[in-house]
Amino acid sequence: MKKRIDAATLTSVVGTLYPPPFDAPCRSRERTKLGDAAGLTQFGVNLLRLPPGAWSSQRHWHTGGDEFVYVLSGEVVLVTDGGEEVMRAGDSAGFPAGDTNGHCLQNRSSSRAEVIEIGTRVPGDSAYYSDVDMVAPAGGKPAIYTHRDGTPYPDIRRRGP
């Protein structure tokens, strides 16, 4: 069995499942699931491509999953409770499970940025969104995205550019 993965041959997913209006800055992001292509089950690995103006996500944190990002090319701005930090090729950042300091990457440059995202896959992990009224509850129950009070968002579907 071949182990080498050619990212150029994999299907990428463009856009987001976020409900409006939270979807807008993430509609043009592109993710290629490298970890899935390798058959990994304990953690996910994505190649994230952010065109100018795109965000990786809304600012969020995970209850059970660690996350790590490594910038391959271009420039992004890491936004956290502590402020903003510019990240360039070779820079990395980690986000431990349960740390409520939400994070996201924003491409404010005029060129595309590429980032490797790594995250553990933990049963029972939920994501909380720091700046907006949204939660991604564990297991997608009662819905993929809910308000903080648990009310599901309607019309969850992929929205692209």
Image: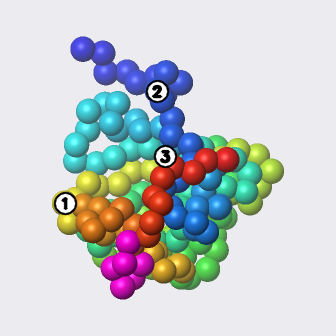
Q: Mark 1 highlights which residue?
A: 123
In the rendered image, residue 121, in percent from the top left (x then y), is placed at 26, 54
Q: Nearer the viewer, mark 3 or mark 1?
A: 1
Disc with the residue nearer the chain's start (1 vs 2): 2
Q: Mark 2 highlights which residue?
A: 10
Question: From this viewpoint, is residue 70 visible?
Answer: no
Q: Which circle marks residue 116 in the picture?
A: 3
Question: From this viewpoint, is residue 45 visible?
Answer: yes
Q: How many marks can you see? A: 3
> To which quarter of the image does residue 56 belong?
bottom right
> In the displayed image of the protein, which residue is found farthest to the top?
1
The amino acid type of the residue labelled 1 equals: Pro
- What residue is at 44 percent from the left and 43 percent from the top? 46
Q: Is residue 98 magenta?
A: no
Q: Crowding at label 3, few (<14), some or many (≥20) Cα neighbours within 10 Å?
A: some
The amino acid type of the residue labelled 2 equals: Leu
- Magenta stretch: helix, strand or loop mostly: loop
Disc with the residue nearer the chain's start (3 vs 1): 3
Q: Which residues are magenta?
A: 147-152
Q: Crowding at label 1, few (<14), some or many (≥20) Cα neighbours within 10 Å?
A: few
In the rendered image, residue 62, in percent from the top left (x then y), is placed at 35, 69
The amino acid type of the residue labelled 3 equals: Ile
- Real-space Cα separation, disc 1 to disc 2, in angstroms: 26 Å
- What residue is at 48 percent from the left and 38 percent from the top? 32
